[in-house]
Amino acid sequence: NAMIVDSSALAEQVVADVVASAFDSAGQRCSALRVLCLQEDCADRIIEMLTGAVAQSRIGDPAQLAVDVGPVIDGQARDGIEKHIEQMRAKGRKVLRSAWNAGDAALAQGTFVLPTLIELDSIAELQREIFGPVLHIVRYRRKDLAQLLAQINATGYGLTLGLHTRIDETIAQVVAGAHAGNVYVNRNMVGAVVGVQPFGGEGLSGTGPKAGGPLYLYRLLSQRPDDVLQRALPADAAADAATPARWHAAAAFAQLRQWAAQSGAPQLAATCSRLQALAPRQHARELQGPTGERNVYTLAPRAAVLCLARSDEDRLTQLAAVLAVGSRAVWPMDARALHARLPQAVRQAIDLVPEWTAPNAAFDAVLHHGDAASLLQTGQALAARPGPIVSIGHAAGGSTAMPLERLVMER
């Protein structure tokens, strides 16, 4: 979980939000701030203010109102955090540890960790997440903002991202480029409110659906309605700008439906029409919330969906579902004969892979047609792959009921 701060941000608000995000609950919330990215123009001033704020914090029993930072969960957690801090110090990184009552003898009786600031050269130095009151700081140049976003995304974690800026173009760039379930602009990163800021991540930080979001309860039903996505994004939701990926998927979807009609495949053509009606017409809606806040709920298509089926009919149904939400399809090489029959625009929306179980086969969701035995085999193969957990949408052979909500990400 990272926060980006540029030189236009209000320093006092930044410091207050950073302290709450990094040190509330002793930094043990899943959404807690781990890496603070400061534009080099404002870094020295904000670090100086943070140093002062940390020095004024009080650690101890969290039942006392005067206490700012309580203990970490147990001795093992404390020892692991302390080991990480010493490793950073041994690498020559600047480490600052302080608290208003750091010398209290009573602190030795609990699993306390002093609030800690560590300056790093790069985000890549962090190999794992540190659950405790430890804030890592990196500096970046304004012209390297896109590169910084890429480094954050490359960690594979995608729960929360914070941004402090007064520049609208920066907000648009970060929100569009972030691979995170929740992006907080000009506020702290902890304390999501059910129904106002539905909470959940992507990648290594979760598979969905978001807790407190419009898709959550549908996942708990034994039978789901077909129009789940339209319920999440009703027709009166504000339209947003389509991305190039969605344009290409829409063109491929239109070509697939036309090809089905011309090739004597009326069932596929009808499935295309039905899935198009069930896909969200918009991709964003503004949620109700407190005065002074704007909370926007967005559905983004998954990057690529693996399609596993034993018949061409089922595979084409899966393809129609993938293209309907604006994603790309991944097909095993044994489907290359069907691939060759499709129009060029449709072929360009499909990636053929020699072996989908290989680590370099890129997809973030699976559609599966088949029986229980093949589903179990597929699940075991997916579980053996490195990387994030991948969600499977399953249907019996011949079924055209596709779980479209599993092919999108909520942000």
Image (cartoon, helix red, strand yellow):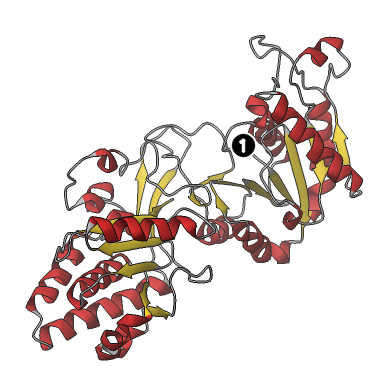
In this rendering, is residue 245 above or below 379?
below
Instruction: Look at label 1 and name its amino acid.
Output: Ala
Can you give x and y, in whole percent of width and height, for residue 144 in the image? Answer: 71, 65
The crowd level at tag 1 (other Cα within 10 Å; few <14, some 14-19, many 20+) is many
Q: Nearer the viewer, residue 288 or 244?
A: 244
User: Which corner quadrant of the image does residue 186 belong to?
Assistant: top right
Which quarter of the picture shows residue 147?
Answer: bottom right
Percent x, y of residue 314: 20, 71
Q: Is residue 63 visible?
A: yes
Please tell me in which quadrant of the rendered image residue 220 appears.
top left
Return the residue at label 1.
Answer: 32
Q: Is residue 38 above or below residue 133?
A: below
Measured from the top left, where is residue 349 in percent x and y? 36, 79
Residue shown at 62% from the left, 50% from the top: 166
Q: Nearer the viewer, residue 142 or 101?
A: 101
Residue occupying the point 64% across, 49% down? 165
Q: Position of residue 126 (x, y in %)?
A: 73, 51
Observer able to see residue 299: no
Q: Tag 1, which secondary structure? A: loop
Q: Is residue 304 left or right of residue 43?
A: left
Is 337 placed left or right of 99 in the picture?
left
Question: Where is 98 relative to 315, above or below?
Answer: above
Q: Say which of 355 and 220 sits in front.
A: 355
Residue drawn at x 23%, y 79% as measured from the top left:
254
Q: Nearer the viewer, residue 150 or 243?
A: 150
Please state if 227 lies on the left or on the right of 23 as rendered.
Answer: left
